[in-house]
Amino acid sequence: METNKFCYEYPRPAVTTDCVIFGFDEGELKVLLIERGIEPYKGRWAFPGGFLNMDENSDECARRELFEETGLENVFIEQLYSFSDVDRDPRGRVITISYYALIKLADYKIQAGDDAEKAKWFPISKVPTLAFDHDRILRIAMNRLRGKIRYQPIGFELLNEKFTIPELQNLYEIILEAQLDRRNFRKKILATGLLIDHKESVKGVPHKGARYFSFDKKKYKELSERGFNFEV
Amino acid sequence: METNKFCYEYPRPAVTTDCVIFGFDEGELKVLLIERGIEPYKGRWAFPGGFLNMDENSDECARRELFEETGLENVFIEQLYSFSDVDRDPRGRVITISYYALIKLADYKIQAGDDAEKAKWFPISKVPTLAFDHDRILRIAMNRLRGKIRYQPIGFELLNEKFTIPELQNLYEIILEAQLDRRNFRKKILATGLLIDHKESVKGVPHKGARYFSFDKKKYKELSERGFNFEV
DNA sequence: TATCTAAGTGTAATTTCTACACAAAGATAA
DNA sequence: TTATCTTTGTGTAGAAATTACACTTAGATA
């Protein structure tokens, strides 16, 4: 660490991770935002994030931030894109490795965060103009989600362990911003053979209750190792 | 920059970009590798890359490195993934924003690089074990290329301005590692309406010469703004 | 002039996708 | 108790896309 030019490459940018946390509730797709308590962009909303520690990689950093913000572990999280524009943070040079996470909102409990921070869920359609370049991050995250939900079984990450097919369809319709045919959707999703029928139905609704299913993760893993491709 | 805790977040990782440069020639997909002249991994091959300057973003950095290595500008280049494992570089903490580029090999002229560096094209199947975590970078780059070539017109970036349909098919077959039906491939690619027929044929081959086409970038841009999706 | 090789072309069979309507369940209201 | 209301659950026929497949043509070489 002493004799090598390499180690003296200074100055260096600061490195952070930010995480777009998606949740789905009451037929709406939502993201978790933090109101900034300090300048710059004081009072504006932003995605949760923070500095990379020297003893963790960016995945660990993103999961740590996610846990601090939501109390959730072992959730779906995936690297999204890295941002490095010279003036993206007025305080100095910061590059951000962004992530997106999909959580089951029912499991979510607000954690006691920094006093200076307030967390709130915003429906996608009601997200205000965000701090830094976070508008761009959201746009990229939405595109990734839209693209990926069609050929990877990630939608289930946003629903309870047990869900109904109409719920699942509703989720797809909202993410893809398209109406889907009820019969064709059910046919296609059941044709994968990856849904486990719990043979019990929703109670307490003033009409026929939909049946509960869950996603067969184990079977999917086996099949995908043999080259099977999920597609909706 | 003085009063804020933020600016004193040290130590910081070094930030680099690395670029997987793909070329296609003689029916083979190749990548450009640099033989390392210094430790660590002295004598091993790695992707070209270098430190992020404080006055450039990572795209600019990657393009600069690409230009220094190949003399090429205005080529297809896209961010791939960021790597940040704690021990990925034995000299210290380094995070790398990786890119991949697609170039027309015919345009390539070796640039006089560092004396300590030797550049060489390797067919994908003959790439040796690489320095750092570059094996992983290559795997991810290949997956991205395979996935993307099916729904984005990026294959053309690897061919000359004028190319023949059998050449294009050969490229697809090699990247997708699959045999494609000659008639169906031609039908589908022509059905996009995005190939311009130059009405001239390959000369000097001991059989019927294939006709030259080029890709109508302008038309593609127009169509894709109206929601058209390229697909092969 | 014959031969060789790869390019260029169309059609029928199969599969997938799309559009569409009525019966069943289960709670609520009369 | 019965009628009503709402949403779930199901099959089929027509359209569109995909697949499989064989002969003719161009152009160089022997």
Image: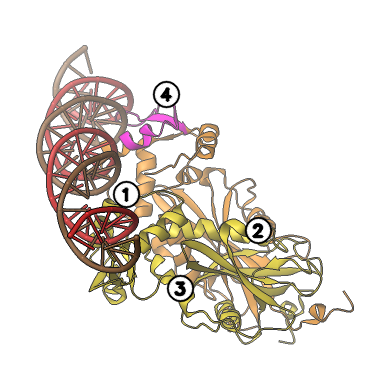
Chain colours: A orange, B yellow, C red, D brown
Q: Is residue D9 above or below residue A29?
A: above
Q: Chain of mark 1?
A: B
Closer to the eye: label 3 or 1: 1
The tag earlier along the polypeptide, 1 or 2, is 2
Q: Amino acid at mark 3?
A: Thr
Cα distance in 3D space between marks 1 and 2: 32 Å
Q: Which residue is mark 3?
A: A129
Residue type at tag 1:
Asp
* Closer-to-camera residue (A73/B115): B115
Q: Give me the disc on residue B181.
A: 1
Q: Is residue B36 left or right of residue B193?
A: right
Q: Write down the region rendered in magenta.
A: A187-214
Mark 3 to mark 2 CA distance (whole Å): 40 Å
Q: Which mark is residue B191?
A: none
Reading the image, the residue beneath label 2 is B135
Labels 2 and 4 within one chain: no
Mark 2: few, some, or many residues within 10 Å (few <14, many ≥20)? some
Q: Badge 3 sits on which subunit?
A: A
Q: Amino acid at mark 2?
A: Asp
**Chain under callout 2:** B
Query: B112 or A32, which is in the foreground?
Result: B112
Q: Position of residue D5 (x, y in %)?
A: 20, 34
Q: Quadrant of the C terminus of chain A?
A: top left
The percent position of residue A4, horizontal first and vertical second, equals 85, 78
**Depth check: B215 or D24 in front?**
D24
Q: What's the residue at 57%, 55% (across, down)?
A: A78
Q: Label 3 neighbourhood size at 10 Å, few (<14), some (14-19), many (20+)?
A: few
